[in-house]
Image (spheres, helix red, strand yellow):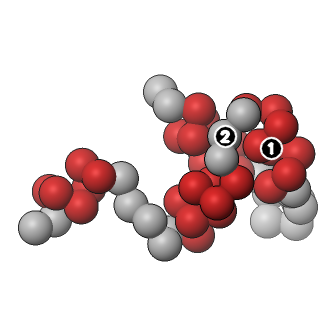
Amino acid sequence: MDPIDKVIKEIKFLEPCETFSYAIIIKKYGVIYITLMRRHKGIIALRTTRISNT
């Protein structure tokens, strides 16, 4: 599993009232901030997902 996928999974398992910081998470996992933000917000999809949807 890619580090970015681990991060997304961790964010999804947070309770609704829990807050998190992208900055803390990127330091912990060493992922790229903009990629994490876009993937978490659903702005960017995996390449395999885009290919299968065409």
| Quadrant hosting residue 52 | bottom left
The residue drawn where x is 81% and y is 33% is 28
The residue drawn where x is 36% and y is 53% is 46
Q: Amino acid at mark 1?
A: Ile
| Quadrant hosting residue 21 | bottom right
Q: Amino acid at mark 2?
A: Val
Identify whether 22 is placed above or below 30: below
Q: Residue furthest left?
A: 54
- For label 2, count other residues whose C-alpha is less than 10 Å away and answer few (under 14), some (14-19) or many (20+): some
Residue assigned mark 1? 25
Q: Secondary structure at mark 1?
A: helix
Q: Earlier in the sequence, mark 1 or mark 2?
A: 1
Q: Secondary structure at mark 2?
A: loop
The image position of residue 26, as x and y in percent, is 77, 43
Q: Is residue 34 visible?
A: yes
The image position of residue 23, as x and y in percent, is 85, 51
The residue drawn where x is 72% and y is 34% is 30
Q: Residue furthest top?
A: 1
| Quadrant hosting residue 22 | bottom right
The residue drawn where x is 10% and y is 67% is 54
- Label 1 or label 2, whichever lies nearer to me, is 2
Q: Is residue 40 visible?
A: no
Identify whether 9 is placed above or below 1: below
Cβ–Cβ under 8 Å for marks 1 and 2:
yes
Cα distance, mark 1 to mark 2?
A: 8 Å
Relative to 31, 28 lies left or right: right
Residue assigned mark 2? 31
Find residue 2 and name its label: none
- For label 1, count other residues whose C-alpha is less than 10 Å away and answer few (under 14), some (14-19) or many (20+): some
The image position of residue 42, as x and y in percent, is 50, 69
Q: Nearer the viewer, residue 14 or 41?
A: 41
